[in-house]
């Protein structure tokens, strides 16, 4: 055990977060956005379009396509969503069925992050200082309080908010990454659970479209295990390497390897830094503080294990030209690192986090309420005019149920702020209650008060509805060569049209041709085709859809 540990925690400080408030907070984070909305562009509707096409038998399950164009190798997430759609047919719509599957993946990620933090906090090197006359935190109570902090840190992270509520393959990758983190954390305590978990995690990550990140996590994880002082952890290394070999073999069999390296130059570094600053907030400053305060224990498991997954995600993010979806996979590890900052924070740091969170999220919530009032009543006039300008044709419906949930969430926020500003709170996780609660509040308000507006702006349904009057009934297919998978998915699902997006589609039998123009620049009309309509996206000023008919 290290001679010096920076954690000083009393038994009172190791109180766990009451389970009912914690479950309500998780529900406020998970459930909003699950009901009553369309898949949003572009990755969300692309993945959903593939799932519903598989469920309806319009594309093979082993080689999914959209418009005749093959998709990437992320088979497992598409199978999962399609299976839920098939099971839910007749009693739940396809959008909700697919979203339920991915909500369960997000819930699994939250649970695995909690257990990973708990098990890593149980290690001897992670325990706080023992007091001369007793009164220090009980090891299990301390680990439980740390796990509550890790869960709050994950929910508070801004980058997870939208991406974590989509139906995209990256959410399956995130759950698999969290499972791999749990496997490494559980290696000395839950021997067979850890082995089974790692044998599942890395192949699942590869089957979900991230074989390179699975390989990176496997290699770095094996290095950590082989350097461990614990024999149980060293014996875990062969199982980790077996999982690595299985993931490589599986990715090769299903064709999941894709060259996605884009690289960065010096001019991209400021953009990358800004992305890390907001995407990883507020976990990144806490994680950096952990690395500093626990610098004498960097090679110990409670620091090195989560650091492995953070480094893999950061490396993939840089290699893929700043991909936020690659960066998201490091969030469980980052949350665990952030949790280990909690027993070392000074009172001034926790106060700064509390005051910033209280003012920032309260101001954001008030802004959402003001805009909602403007949409419903026209007062204040300027925000109402801005909405009308940015979303032409949008009419805000009134929902008493949405208003009730938004009001309940706002009152709960007031209660949390009042609780946190009390002087008697000394729990380890106290400084993350307001960040996590504020994120959950704002997401709840957006998915209730603003949901119709966001759906109008981000769904492809309004565009397809504008296009529908120009497509004659009984049209056998629409040629759309080069059109993005997101637009193909929207046309097939919302329009119920068969789309041919292959490069040779214009030479096929389709009587209609669809082209998408960026920057309002329409290409010349090809010979043998007549323009039928030019349809702008309702909330997109730089995108037009041009529909043409084959000349008779």
Image: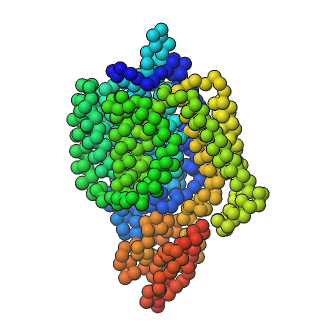
Q: Is residue 6 above or below residue 320?
A: above
Q: Is residue 494 left or right of residue 5?
A: right
Front in this rendered view, residue 80 or 487:
487
Q: Is residue 430 above or below residue 443?
A: above
Q: Position of residue 547 (x, y in %)?
A: 51, 79
Q: Position of residue 210 (x, y in %)?
A: 34, 51
Front in this rendered view, residue 407 or 228:
228
Q: Position of residue 5 (x, y in %)?
A: 40, 23
Q: Quadrant of residue 453?
A: bottom right
Q: Position of residue 280 (x, y in %)?
A: 48, 45
Q: Is residue 543 above or below residue 7?
A: below
Q: Is residue 315 visible?
A: yes
Q: Quadrant of residue 261?
A: bottom left
Q: Residue at x 38, y 78 (%)?
A: 505
Q: Is residue 185 visible?
A: no
Q: Is residue 393 left or right of residue 484?
A: right
Give the color scheme: rainbow, by chain, secondary structure or one colour: rainbow
Which of the image's four quarters has the N terminus? top left
The image shows a total of numbered marks equal to 0
Q: Residue at x 42, y 60 (%)?
A: 267
């Amino acid at each position: 055990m290290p001679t010096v540990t920076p954690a000083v925690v009393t038994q009172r400080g190791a109180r766990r977060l009451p389970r009912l408030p914690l479950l309500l907070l998780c529900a406020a984070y998970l459930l909003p956005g699950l009901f009553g909305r369309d898949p949003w562009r572009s990755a969300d509707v692309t993945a959903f379009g593939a799932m519903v096409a598989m469920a309806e038998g319009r594309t093979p399950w082993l080689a999914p396509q959209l418009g005749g164009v093959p998709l990437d190798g992320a088979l497992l997430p598409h199978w999962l969503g399609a299976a839920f759609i098939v099971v839910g047919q007749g009693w739940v719509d396809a959008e909700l069925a697919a979203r339920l599957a991915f909500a369960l993946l997000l819930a699994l990620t939250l649970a695995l992050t909690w257990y990973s933090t708990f098990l890593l906090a149980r290690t001897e090197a992670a325990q706080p200082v023992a007091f001369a006359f007793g009164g220090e935190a009980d090891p299990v109570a301390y680990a439980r309080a740390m796990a509550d902090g890790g869960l709050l840190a994950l929910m508070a992270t801004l980058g997870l908010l939208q991406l974590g509520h989509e139906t995209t393959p990256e959410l399956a990758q995130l759950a698999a990454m969290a499972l791999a983190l749990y496997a490494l954390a559980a290696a000395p305590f839950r021997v067979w659970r850890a082995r089974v978990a790692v044998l599942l995690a890395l192949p699942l990550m590869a089957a979900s479209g991230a074989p390179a990140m699975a390989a990176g996590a496997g290699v770095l994880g094996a290095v950590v295990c082989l350097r461990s002082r614990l024999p149980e952890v060293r014996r875990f290394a062969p199982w980790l390497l077996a999982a690595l070999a299985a993931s490589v073999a599986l990715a090769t069999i299903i064709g999941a390897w894709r060259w996605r390296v884009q690289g960065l130059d010096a001019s991209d570094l400021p953009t990358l830094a800004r992305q890390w600053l907001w995407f990883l907030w507020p976990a990144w400053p806490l994680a950096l503080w952990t690395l500093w305060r626990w610098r004498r224990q960097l090679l110990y498991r409670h620091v090195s294990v989560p650091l492995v997954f953070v480094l893999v995600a950061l490396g993939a993010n840089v290699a893929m030209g700043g991909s936020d979806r690659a960066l998201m996979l490091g969030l469980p590890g980052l949350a665990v690192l952030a949790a280990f900052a909690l027993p070392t924070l000074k009172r001034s740091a926790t106060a700064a986090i509390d005051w910033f969170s209280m003012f920032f999220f309260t101001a954001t919530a008030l802004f959402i309420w003001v805009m909602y009032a403007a949409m419903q009543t026209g007062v204040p006039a300027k925000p109402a005019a801005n909405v009308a300008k940015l979303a032409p044709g949008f009419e805000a419906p009134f929902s008493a149920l949405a208003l009730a949930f938004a009001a309940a969430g706002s009152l709960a926020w007031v209660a949390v702020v009042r609780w946190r500003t009390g002087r008697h709170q000394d729990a380890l996780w106290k400084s993350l209650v307001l960040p996590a609660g504020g994120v959950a509040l704002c997401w709840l308000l957006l998915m209730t008060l603003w949901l119709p507006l966001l759906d109008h702006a981000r769904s492809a349904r309004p565009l397809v509805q504008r296009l529908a009057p120009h497509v004659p009934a009984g049209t056998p297919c629409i040629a759309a060569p080069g059109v993005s998978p997101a637009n193909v998915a929207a046309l097939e699902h919302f329009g119920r049209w068969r789309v041919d997006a292959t490069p040779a589609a214009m030479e096929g039998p389709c009587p209609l041709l669809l082209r998408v123009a960026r920057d309002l620049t329409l290409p010349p009309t090809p010979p043998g085709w007549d323009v039928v309509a030019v349809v702008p996206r309702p909330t997109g000023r730089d995108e037009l859809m041009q529909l043409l008919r084959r000349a008779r």
